[in-house]
Amino acid sequence: MSQTIVAANVGKPPKRPFWTERRRTASTAYLYISPFFILFLIFGVYPIFFTFYLSFFKWNAISPMKYVGFQNFALIFEDPTFWVSLMNTILMGIMGTVPQLIVALLLAVALNSAIVRFKNFFRIVYFLPNITSIVAVTLVFSVIFSNQGMANMLLDWLGVTTDVAWNSGWWGVKIAIAVMIFWRWTGYNAIIYLAGLQSISPELYEAAKIDGANSRDALFKITIPLLKPFILFTILTSTIGSLQLFTEPFVFLGTSGTGATRPEGITMVIYLYREAFTNSYFGTAAATAVVLFLFTIIFSLINLMITNRLGSSGSSLGGAK
């Protein structure tokens, strides 16, 4: 019998073991990086899907969940405060983001030029606001924009007006919060633009100068078109950040003693926070989060389309020339 088995195996290739050296090395590598993916699934992916799931239920975190369909979405769309929070979010985002990106680009161009000295010092100074605590920054600006603060003193000195209600007026609150956003993120975006400027070959500017291009031509025909990926990145991150605005208005209006849920300062994230942790309506809070998610995608796509169109227009002008 054994002679028959041996004769049957003659001529067959030897069976390879399952745990080869290559599979063992790959498994070890996956084992080392698995904690990140496990934590990401638990704290990143699962909450997203649970939020979508929860938006169709009525739940106060204690009693059993009750399926209500699209009723939570109908409730928030019928709530005037939700639309006020959306308008405040868009207004404060535009007021804080648009000037910030323009000034950041101008600062980066100035830092990249040969006439500015102590560039490393200015890079550090511009980036410092970004690593400062948001709460600490907001508390400092709360003092500046108080009734007797430096902002009103400056306006008095300029003779413009007196006693602007920065922490209770409809536009005063928005301007104060927009200034905080501007101060915090301008330097960060300037550093990103500066990295993009330094990736542009100086030979392009030398060739353009030989062809008779002036500084304005170089800026609009070389610098901005080649900075397009960096501009797109800053616009997208700024859009997402402005739609998620929470800490600045929450701390700024909270220190005034009247709360951050007043109509002049409430944002979509504060509205979401109020629904979940003040009113215990986690279903409507989840529905608000889903709507905010969809708005973020829509605004990001609009910005992407506008930026691509501007870049195409600049390229076509350059080609025609």
Image: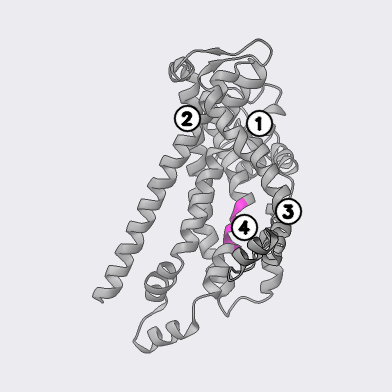
Marks 2 and 3 sit apart, C-alpha to C-alpha, by 37 Å
First-in-chain label (2 vs 4): 4
Dot 4: within a 10 Å radius of its alpha carbon, few (fewer than 14), some, or many (20 or more) residues?
A: many
**Which mark, residue 188?**
4
Binning the other alpha carbons within 10 Å of mark 2 as few (below 14), some (14 to 19) or many (20 upward) gives: some
Q: Quadrant of the C terminus?
A: bottom left
Vertical placement of residue 148 versus 275, above or below: below
Instruction: Find out whether the residues at labels 4 and 3 contact each other: C-beta distance under 8 Å.
Output: no
Say which label, 1 or 3, has the lower sequence index. Answer: 3
Stretch in magenta: 185-191
x%, y% of residue 69? 46, 16
The nearer-to-camera label among 1 and 3 is 3
* Residue identifier under label 3: 31
Say whether residue 188 is magenta: yes
> Can residue 147 be spotted in the picture?
no
Residue 17 position in % (x across, y down): 68, 61
User: Which label's residue is closer to the chain start, 4 or 3?
Assistant: 3
Single out the residue that lies furthest toward the bottom.
210
Q: CA distance from mark 1 to mark 4?
A: 23 Å
* Residue mark closest to the camera, 4 vs 3: 3
Q: Residue at x 45, y 41 (%)?
A: 297
Where is mark 1, residue-wise?
Answer: 250
Query: Could you say where residue 245 lies in the image, as x and y percent from the top left?
Result: 58, 37
Give the residue type at disc 3.
Leu
